[in-house]
Amino acid sequence: MKNKFRVVIVGGVAAGPKVASKVIRLCPDAEVTVIEKGKLLSYAGCGLPYYVSGVVKDQKELMATPVGTVRDSIFFQHVKNVRVLNQTEAIQIDREQKRVQIHDLVQNQRSWLEYDKLVLCTGATPVIPPIPGTDLENVFTLQGVHDAEGIRAALAENKARDVVIVGGGLIGVEITEALVQHGCRVTIVEMMPQILRILDLDMARLVEKHMESHGVKVLTHTRLEAIEGNGVVSAVQTSAGRFAADMVVLAIGVRPNTTLAQVAGLDIGTSGGIKVTDRMQSSDPDIYAAGDCVESTDLMTGKGCFVPLGSTANKQGRVAAINLCGGEDHFPGVLGSTVCKVFDYCVARTGLGESAAKDHGYDTATILAPAPDKAHFMPEARLLILKLIADRKSRRLLGVQAVGPGAGDKRVDVVAMALTSGWTVDQLAHADLCYAPPYAPAMDNILTAANVMRNKLDGYMEGISAENVHTMLEQKLDFTFLDVRSPGEHEQVRLPGSILIPLGALRRRLGELPKDKEVITFCKISLRGYEAALILKAAGFKKVRVMDGGVVTWPYEKLVS
Amino acid sequence: MKNKFRVVIVGGVAAGPKVASKVIRLCPDAEVTVIEKGKLLSYAGCGLPYYVSGVVKDQKELMATPVGTVRDSIFFQHVKNVRVLNQTEAIQIDREQKRVQIHDLVQNQRSWLEYDKLVLCTGATPVIPPIPGTDLENVFTLQGVHDAEGIRAALAENKARDVVIVGGGLIGVEITEALVQHGCRVTIVEMMPQILRILDLDMARLVEKHMESHGVKVLTHTRLEAIEGNGVVSAVQTSAGRFAADMVVLAIGVRPNTTLAQVAGLDIGTSGGIKVTDRMQSSDPDIYAAGDCVESTDLMTGKGCFVPLGSTANKQGRVAAINLCGGEDHFPGVLGSTVCKVFDYCVARTGLGESAAKDHGYDTATILAPAPDKAHFMPEARLLILKLIADRKSRRLLGVQAVGPGAGDKRVDVVAMALTSGWTVDQLAHADLCYAPPYAPAMDNILTAANVMRNKLDGYMEGISAENVHTMLEQKLDFTFLDVRSPGEHEQVRLPGSILIPLGALRRRLGELPKDKEVITFCKISLRGYEAALILKAAGFKKVRVMDGGVVTWPYEKLVS
């Protein structure tokens, strides 16, 4: 009798179960074994913040199929014909003899498992900062279900009034919302000048302001120095002072689990993940790898990058399975498409940000396009602020970022498609997207953003960032800061140092403005600001610029009546 | 003194105002005149159903900018420096002398207006069927604000209990929802075998069922023969009988307004719209045209098509303005991307449908992919049913259709981008789309749909439509109709003629099924159905097919406990 085709998969959370399921579908006779260190299998780690918040009631929901079947060992055996060894650790790989040594953590026994093909789906582990106190009670990371259970227990016992989140990345921000919903006073401690480094500084600032409006204290430029407490955490010491804390969540990032691969002599990429081909093959052709433990290729730069996401893990797992079964599939790489919910804001981006684009040598142009995400007369229309990044010379689109209550995920997905195809902003402006008042404005936000960029690239509009205007105001430079909104809008909220001439009155009141002085125009979103600038330029004003984004994206103090 | 550059625009609703605004931005010294037959300017015609429903409270909102300024003649003069002649009709074009004869409908005076460039934005007009009674009171179309006002007045006076909508296209469906919200009993009379011909029959059927669940009577294959009444409408006579009606809305389609162009000798396209280049230039280089009156190019077939939409009108208007001012821009064409809201369902599509693809000679493959539109454990996740259409040979994506409460517009926009770039389904499966539980499943619906299609194209899955299974059942053919859901699901709702073996028990109960008889498997969405088929095939069953879509897309009778 012919030997069965033996596939051993290390890791049973995201990529691993995907590989197992797909292998069995392609090769029903294969002998597939999944080795998982933990107790639980195939759970949606990305759902943990929603389990902490209570939106997801039962942890079983995170481990269930859409119809409610829990994906445990029995499920894998009966439904998938996959053997699962959980609470079992893979200790070492013997590449010569093609076998893995495993350690049964319950029986405390070691044994060898032979493979024809091995797949490493070992995931990533939260980074613990090398400071005192990380082992105190009520100090958590958010890696697994046990962390979420710990946080929930502390919340249930009312032991978490003051919470410090260390790190303002995706996980830090998502768990913040969950904790605020429980009534915690949350402080985010972030070492860098901004939270959410997936965004440019100007866009991140808008998110920080939004979090602060929900009572969150956001401390940027702040380094965690120690966690203090007597058995249980009671405070944190930071470069900005000492803060009371009865819970601390460490969310400074994750690191790919590559020890097994490294010890076996497999190549590791510059970003720290296991190096794989686009067939998800490691430097040993019989060993594949997928998910949070591998290095991906950045489609914008062609370089290696570490972007651990559940969506990518699933796609890579499928590719690995097809190839190891003798098929042919290729994972092209990632754009860094990301979305996260911050209270009622959708925050998303794809491609290169402004600073990353500059770092890669692009002659970068950016625009801000704030607008309602649906026909403005629909009551459910919400503000969506888009930032587009493009290359001046080639007019190629480089990236997009979205912040606001409007549907940013939808527009970022559209740009992700454009980036993959190497589109210019001109091509994007003509995309045939769906339109009806409950879903989009007649000119979809992303098309408007593309047109604003074209106006800039074509020289019709010269922009200036709010940050630069703010600096000019602080330096008391001599320029006209011209608000062209209506008197009613101006009365509600004003920018410091601005004067008002409504757009409709501008043509007949041109004489009030000195022609030799620079004029910086703005309105609510800077469409009228743009029209005002064109009127001024046609009237012979020498230097006219439009403030990018307008009042809604001004991140500094506003004067309110 | 040099003569001013004179631009005359005929039509002031959608494309016309866009052309005017853009021309003034590009050429601030131009003399721009807009001629509009009606009283009102620049209103959002697509918003009329929402004004009828009451979602939009005041008709002024439909004519206002996002910050609430009403776009009337004074607005255009003061803000835009554009002269508007409303209640004025363009009578004829004198191409020799480059002038338009206009008729002031208020003063009843005729005069000539000279132009350097003329732009026709004459829009489209609802088709009135050539039957008796269309002039009775309470018989409406839905072209302008006056129609919406008429309908609202009848509703306010409680004069519209029984309403017949003639035509189940986009406008018919949108106005149906508005009227049901007012408590009307609505009947849709549609001549064709289905409503919403933007969809394939199977997808349209799901929408019809949804409308019926909201109390709407949908009569397909039914021809309107007469509208009856004594001054006021009281009934309609159709091929399916006579129905009481105290209001009738005629929504059988619109026809481009091309008389002005035709009389002037401009070329008209095969689809009936004014023929234009991709610069929006008519056959006379000094006359441009944009919006609902022109023929567009179908990007999928390269042929002329008539797809009147506010979004397209805006884009074409911008292109016309740039070119007539001496710039260079090109409108590539349309995919027919469309979305509409049907109660809580989002209905959308882009590209070619199954039948259109077959008509164009493609060897068409289709799949149905029903799934939650967000991580299934999020309470706000909603069902989204996607149908993907692809070419078997080239594996090129041809189109997508979406029906259900889930966010279909987002997925259809993604596919619109893929179609424009000529992607294969394999490329689509690897797209890097945003993922977080509140926005998408880890494998976005569109990626799952692409993978289901790949499974089909690669021969792993042989599908059969619900329609064909239904026919086989009616013909009492001998096959095993195998439900592999859980006993709980089966008890709640069953398909006629099916037997149950849950997927988890299938491997050990294979002996219960005759191997020589065809097996057609299914589950809720047909993922487990697919896995069951693979198990059966591996076990030596000769003929195994999976029913596309599963229980949720079965449009026939179900057995409910």
Image (cartoon, coloured by chain):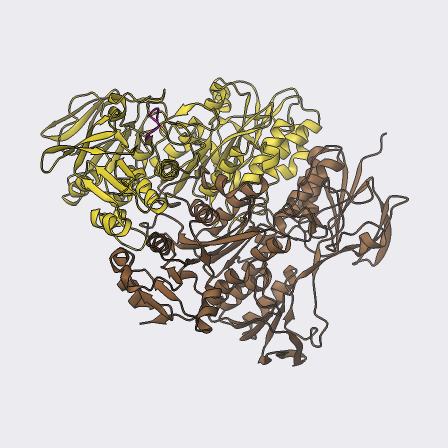
Chain colours: A brown, B yellow
Q: Position of residue B273 (x, y in %)?
A: 33, 25
In the picture, the quarter occupied by the C terminus of chain B is: top left
Quadrant where the N terminus of chain B is found in the figure: top left
- Residue at coordinates 33% horizontally, 31% vertically from top-left? B288
Q: Residue at x 50, y 70 (%)?
A: A216
Classify residue B205 as left or right of residue A314: left
Query: Could you tell me residue A390's position as x and y percent?
Result: 54, 49
The magenta stretch is B282-287
- Residue B41 picture location, percent across and down: 23, 43
Outermost residue on the right side: it is A96
Quick one: B504 or A353, which is closer to the camera? Answer: A353
Of B532 and A182, the residue lying toward us: A182
Q: How many marks?
A: 0
Q: Is A433 part of what is drawn in magenta? A: no
In the rendered view, tell whether residue A71 sits above or below residue A427: below
Residue B12 visible in this rendered orientation of the protein: yes
The residue at the far front in this view is B1
Quadrant of res B231? top left
Query: In this orientation, which residue lies closer to the viewer: B180 or B175?
Result: B175
Image coords of residue A554 (percent x, y): 43, 64
Q: Main secondary structure of the magenta part?
A: loop
Q: Is residue B501 visible?
A: no
Against B71, residue B299 (above or below) is above
**A408 up-or-down from B237: above or below:** below
| Residue at the image position 70 percent from the left and 73 percent from the top | A135
